[in-house]
Image: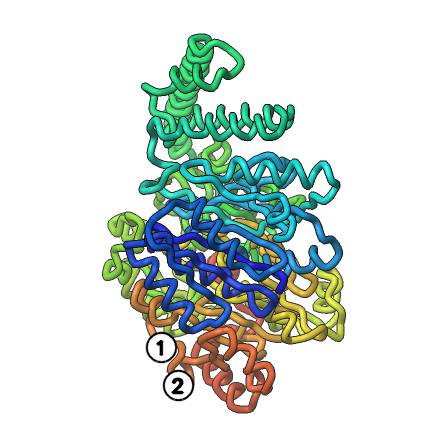
Amino acid sequence: MLLSVVVPVHRVQGYLRASLESVLGQGPGEWELLVVDDGARDGGAEIAAEIAARDPRVRVLTLAEHRGAGPARNAGAAEARGRYLLFLDGDDLLRPGALEAITGRLAVSEPDVLLLGHDRIDWWGDVSSPVSVAEGFATAVPRLFRRAFWTEHGLHFTDGHYEDVLPVHRATLLASDAGTLDTLDRICVRHSIRRSGTFATTPGRHHFAILDAYERLLAETGHDPRIRAARTRHLRAVLADPGRTAPEDRAAFHRAAALPGNYAVHRTREAARTGRTRTRAVLRRRRKTLRARVMRAAYRTDLLRPLDPGLAVYGSYWNRGVACNPAAIHAKALELAPHIRGVWAVSSRHRDRMPPGIPYVIEGSRAYWRAMATATYLINNSSFPGGFTKRPGQRYLQTHHGTPLKTMGLDQRAYPALTNGISFEKIVAHADQWDFSLSANPHTTEIWDRVYPSGYEHLNLGYPRNDIFFTATPEQTAAIRQRLSLAPDRTVLLYAPTHRDYRKGFVPHLDLERLARELGPDYVVLVRAHYFYGRSAQLDGARVVDVTGYPSVEELCLVSDALITDYSSLMFDYACLDRPIISHAPDWAAYRASRGTYFDLLSGRPGDTPGAVATDEDELLELFRTGEWRSARTAELRAAFRERFCPYDDGHAAERVVRRLFLSDRE
């Protein structure tokens, strides 16, 4: 057996299931999971027993009483069978594909210690930047230990707090000096930063135990300078961490640690630094407030200017750049209505996304407010920033950015836990600004009319962004495949799940590497995370390609042979292509209960279900093994779905919109 993963369990019941499942979800391999019940009294032991009962790779060891993380890890190591040991905390997550990557590294290198990349996630769900593995002398860096090496040198975790200081640093020194230290610069482990209830979030004198731990380590290593440097860094981190060192203990900790520099001087410097930081923050706020006042005053003046009949302001996805329906309308307007000058509103964070030659203004800038005050035409698929004043004579087209499966607008009032403080009064006020609301199908028109109640006109003209599905030539599609380095004989699957309101980071419900591996070399999986999750899905692999940052999702649809999604509105657009749509819906019941949906995607009824359905990973793989993903039955479902949701799309939607919005007075 290659690897034993050891997880101590004590006061982690809210995190343990996800932690253990993150290991089990790694797929087959030469590994075992040893869960050590360290006197858990909060349900953790029951969770561990439940999981062990259904998976023979899991063994549970029960200590007679709570002894601490160190002895618990030692107990697990003593029962381990693998050639290597990996110690995880009960709230750690093993990232998808980690064990496969580890196995691959160990196949070409057999180090005594293997350092692993990691990142952190806080209680809000925010993920920190990846932590480099270059700094081996840091206890937070996860690592594998060759079990024979661990045993041969008598390595073991100590009792009490900071139990990992001694064995981790000793092992790293031994391996480094012998030339058997290696690194895997890939995010394998995600540490959880919990808000409370842990040793690391409880300040007090018990953190002085780190001083004794390093004194013992220095004595055993001959005061190695690398250990002295690591000690200084670690102690400074503890001193600066309010979760570990209380303000009233900092002077005593500084004296006991004998850190370089007088603590009074250190405190003075810290106070000065804090004071400077606060002063700068106050000045920034004052400058920002003053600037906002100046901008609003200038905007009020601009509102007195006449409207420019040839100016249109475009925006999409909350100022993320040129995309979606507004982009298609802008392109067609350049062709059919050249007298209309288009300018895009974009956030300063996304200005790098602007294509060369496309005019734009930065949101909140002087140019932005002047454009918003004087443009006759406003086109957006979300909303314009800053709370602009809609003037008489301005024409605002709300294009939206998808057919609604989940509840929208005022229907969200039934799900207050997931509305994040949304002001429904502002939703209605925003709808009051619209002159036109664009729709791709009768279902959408019906929903918008109810959830955005106001006096705008429905434009049942189709989605301009979908025109490319009808107009692209084989040569254009081949060129896109070439740009993406997709061989012409490969079957390309586009995996594009939607976001979850309760999750801030992209966590795929699929083991994408396993999917690509099981499908074989004839398939390529393109992964498109929702734009709420940024520009990268932080994935890599030979046949799994992260295309989250690719500028056009429509082009990704064109080059793909099938779409795998859960509840993304992309399925409605993709139906225009009349290609297989596979619904992978592992949490459908929870999604419906938490957010609400307008119909049952998994019902199997014509018009509701777009094609093949899988509720877990194995079912999804079976659809491809049997060919059911593109069977005659699923083609019939797709045809009914297409008829219901794509009746207005025919390749000419952008032209119809341009003529209605810009040219109706001329024709």
Please state the horizontal and vertical placement of residue 414, each as a whole percent of the image: 23, 61
Q: Position of residue 638 (x, y in %)?
A: 50, 82
| 452 or 248: nearer the viewer | 248
- Quarter that holds the N terminus: bottom right
- Residue type at the position of mark 2: Arg
| Residue 416 locus on image (x, y percent) | 25, 56
Q: Nearer the viewer, residue 659 or 620?
A: 620
Kindly identify which residue carries mark 1.
600
Q: Is residue 455 visible?
A: no
Q: Position of residue 458 (x, y in %)?
A: 37, 65
Relative height, residue 96 to residue 53 (above, below): above
In the image, residue 472 sits, relative to residue 316, either above or below, namely below
* Mark 1 / mark 2, whichever is N-terminal: 1
Disc sitting over residue 605 in the figure: 2
- Residue at 41% over, 85% down: 604
Please tell me whether residue 156 is drawn above or below residue 580 in the rendered image: above
Q: Is residue 3 left or right of residue 242?
A: right
